[in-house]
Image: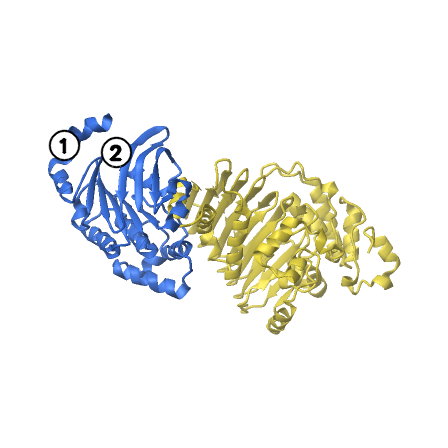
């Protein structure tokens, strides 16, 4: 479904991704772990199409389609979703208004206002959110936890085929982490895949990954099952550097 | 009707053209430019009382004496000798729909305005079909003693009331443009609301029968008597099409004790227009005046609605939004003068600049000595849609009283790459994302407008922005 081959990308002339390969099939949950500066967030931004990043080499296809020919909104319409590490504030635009616009722009047939209202209420209840939340301005004055819940709410509303989660767990307390995980697990199924990008394996206790990859210096240096996350936790990123640092530099 | 018809010619045949039935003929001053003779012709043509003629002539002297202001936008290309100072709107109907520029037609099209209404708005058709609705409302208002008519009729039918208040809030010699307006004014609205009367439905200037609301020099006077309420809506969000390049209106509001006046304007001038308007209100004891002011289009707008809080407990609010596109300068803001104790005020100004557009906030907050416990808050926010756009803020604050509470806050933000990317990652196109950011930005103003105006304001700004996204 998602196929990344030899991906190279840079920002402001500095190369961050240096030949990354990854394949995700439908229904699979993948986790990418890595130390700060390994290029994890760059990967998520490049996959979604942030204009500040330049792809210098390699291919990425999503259901066979070259995504680098598509703008971010077109990728969203194909079923890609990015849960942001730092979601932007949009003053004056309510969460409900934003959700309506977003959902109707990715759907072939627009939902009626009543259907939309019900759907928003249902998803918010599921995520244990106060109904008043829908009337607040998008991310304005939200706490860190509210921002992340809001990202998960959007994910549930948009019902993507692939969700890329950029350090969604960072800065969350246990309650928020559980709610976030509940959202992802609710979508889990043969038609949903996720790429969970994280520094810690904490979130992986709640969302069990099928595959774990370790990223260093812009590449995936080793992959394994969920046990790899435990090994990492035990040995730390210094172990990764010692073990794979030279390989990454070559 | 030949274009060179003059008052002299008309004067030779009064019976045929009939001053009593002024809608029956066309009239235009015989030449461009302004002098006492032209002013006298206008006044004579309208059959005005002597005092108004004298008022006009005195105002003309003030106009000559005042220099063109240099502190605001660039007025150097404005040539007062190249303007016709009085054209009866009926003359416009000599034009046809074919004469209306394509960009204006396209805007009507995109706004979904019916053809009949489009023609009226473009000044080429008869008054549109709202007359029936208007008529029944008018009967209701008249029963309550409300006066709502064009200013020329107001002067004819309520001369004493007009004479008592006209020019008392904005004296003719207040500034060069109020002087010009006072000399050549025509049209505008006259509103009087009796004590204790609340008008629930907004009075809308474009409902007005025999309106000369396309006038360039309209003059509006609203008097809200004690404990009354009126919401007046001026203009319309459709583009105002004038062949002339200067619009200079004067609007005076008087809110007597306990009264509340809300005055909403959204104007979208053609891009060659100088829009130089003086708006001022006086709020007496416990009265409230609110200006809601939207400025789009024009080459240069200079407009600073003012509220003088002269009675204890009075309140003034100014909400303004301006959009400056390529080549445009919106120099707008507000003035609040606290001249009595326990008065309060709020100025909220929002500006959007795109391309080479420039928006300026220019405001004055003045608290006189003795205006104890005055409370004021000024907030101006500028949004820049791209790198070249420009915004400036000139907040003048003069406080002579110690016991006051004032706050001032100014922000400048740019529509950021990250913000657009965030919205686009949820399926919105770049244009939709930009429009969403802008609509959110003006939301605090839009929510103060009647729904249909708020929607049109949003759509108009979107139309102005079209093609602005690279």
Answer whether residue A237 is visible to the viewer in this image. yes
Give the letter of the yellow chain: B
Q: Which residue is mark 2?
A: A219
Residue A106 versus residue A88: which sits nearer the camera?
A106
Q: What residue is drawn where x is 42% and y is 57%?
A: A108
Residue A223 on image: x %, y %? 19, 39
Q: Secondary structure at mark 1?
A: helix
Q: Is residue B372 above or below residue A21?
A: below
Which disc is residue B113 wearing? none
- Chain identifier of the residue bearing label 1 in the image: A
Residue A21 on image: x %, y %? 27, 37
Residue B249 on image: x %, y %? 64, 51
Other residues around mark 2 within 10 Å, as few (<14) / some (14–19) / many (≥20): many
Other residues around mark 1 within 10 Å, as few (<14) / some (14–19) / many (≥20): few
Side (left or right) of B271 relative to B33: left
Q: What residue is drawn where x is 50% and y is 44%?
A: B352
Answer whether residue B339 is visible to the viewer in this image. no
Q: Nearer the viewer, mark 2 or mark 1?
A: 2
Give the letter of the blue chain: A
Q: What residue is drawn where x is 35% and y is 45%?
A: A64
Side (left or right) of B84 relative to A192: right
Residue sticking out furthest to the front: A64
Which disc is residue A239 wearing? 1
Earlier sequence position, callout 2 versus callout 1:
2
């Amino acid at each position: 479904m998602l196929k990344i081959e030899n991906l190279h990308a840079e920002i402001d002339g500095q190369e961050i991704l240096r030949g990354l390969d990854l394949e995700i099939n439908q229904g699979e949950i993948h986790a990418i772990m890595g130390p700060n500066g390994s290029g994890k967030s760059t990967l998520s931004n490049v996959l979604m199409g942030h204009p500040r990043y330049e792809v210098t080499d390699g291919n990425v296809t999503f259901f066979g389609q070259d995504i680098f020919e598509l703008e971010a909104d077109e990728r969203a319409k194909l079923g890609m979703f990015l849960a942001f590490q730092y979601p932007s504030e949009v003053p004056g635009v309510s969460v409900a208004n934003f959700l309506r616009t977003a959902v109707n722009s990715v759907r072939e047939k627009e939902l009626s206002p009543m259907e939309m209202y019900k759907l928003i209420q249902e998803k918010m209840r599921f995520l244990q959110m106060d109904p008043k939340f829908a009337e607040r301005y998008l991310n304005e004055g939200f706490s860190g936890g509210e921002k992340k819940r809001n990202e998960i709410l959007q994910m549930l509303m948009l019902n993507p085929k692939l969700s890329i989660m950029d350090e969604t767990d960072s800065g969350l307390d246990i309650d928020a982490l559980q709610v976030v995980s509940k959202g992802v697990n609710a979508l889990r199924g043969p038609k949903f895949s996720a790429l969970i990008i994280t520094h810690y394996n904490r979130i992986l206790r709640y969302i069990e990954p099928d595959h774990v990859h370790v990223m260093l210096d812009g590449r995936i240096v080793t992959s394994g099952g969920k046990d790899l996350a435990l090994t990492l936790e035990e040995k730390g990123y210094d172990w990764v550097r010692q073990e794979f640092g030279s390989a990454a530099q070559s | 009707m030949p274009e060179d018809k003059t008052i002299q010619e008309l004067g030779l045949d009064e019976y045929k053209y009939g001053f009593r039935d002024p809608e029956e003929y066309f009239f235009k001053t015989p030449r461009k430019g302004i002098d006492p003779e032209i002013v006298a012709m206008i006044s004579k043509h309208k059959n005005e009382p002597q005092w108004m003629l004298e008022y006009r002539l005195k105002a003309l002297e003030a106009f000559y004496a005042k220099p063109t202001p240099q502190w605001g936008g660039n007025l150097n290309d404005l040539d007062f000798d190249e303007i016709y100072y009085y054209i009866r709107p009926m003359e416009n109907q000599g034009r046809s729909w074919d004469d209306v520029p394509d960009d204006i037609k396209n805007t009507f099209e995109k706004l979904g305005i019916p053809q009949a209404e489009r023609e009226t708005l473009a000044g080429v058709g008869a008054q549109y079909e709202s007359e029936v609705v208007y008529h029944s409302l008018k009967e209701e208002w008249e029963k309550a003693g409300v006066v709502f008519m064009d200013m020329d009729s107001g002067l004819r039918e309520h001369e004493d009331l007009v004479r008592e208040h006209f020019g008392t809030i904005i004296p003719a010699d207040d500034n060069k443009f109020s002087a010009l307006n006072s000399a050549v004014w025509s049209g505008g609205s006259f509103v009087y609301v009796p004590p204790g009367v609340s008008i629930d439905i907004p009075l809308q200037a474009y409902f007005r029968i025999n309106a000369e609301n396309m006038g360039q020099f309209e003059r509006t006077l609203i008097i809200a008597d004690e404990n009354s309420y009126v919401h007046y809506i001026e203009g319309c969000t459709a583009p105002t099409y004038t062949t002339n390049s200067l619009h200079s209106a004067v609007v005076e509001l008087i809110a007597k004790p306990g009264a509340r006046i809300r005055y909403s304007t959204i104007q979208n001038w053609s891009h060659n227009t100088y829009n130089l308007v003086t708006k001022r209100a006086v709020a007496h004891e416990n009265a409230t005046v609110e200006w809601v002011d939207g400025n789009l289009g024009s080459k240069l707008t200079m407009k600073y609605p003012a509220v003088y809080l002269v009675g204890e407990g009075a309140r003034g609010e100014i909400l303004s939004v301006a959009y400056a596109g390529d080549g445009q300068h919106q120099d707008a803001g507000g003035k609040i003068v606290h001249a009595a104790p326990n008065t309060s005020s709020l100025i909220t100004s929002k500006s959007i600049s795109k391309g080479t557009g420039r928006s300026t906030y220019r405001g004055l907050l003045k608290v006189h000595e003795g205006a104890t416990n005055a409370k004021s808050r000024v907030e101006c926010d500028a949004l820049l849609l791209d790198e070249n756009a420009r915004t400036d803020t000139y907040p003048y604050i003069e406080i002579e009283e110690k016991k006051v509470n004032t706050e001032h806050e100014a922000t400048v933000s740019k529509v950021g790459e990250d913000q657009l990317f965030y919205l686009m990652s949820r399926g919105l196109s770049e244009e939709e994302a930009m429009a969403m950011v802008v609509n959110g930005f003006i939301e605090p103003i839009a929510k103060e407008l009647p729904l249909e105006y708020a929607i049109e304001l949003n759509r108009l700004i979107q139309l102005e922005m079209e093609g602005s996204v690279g």
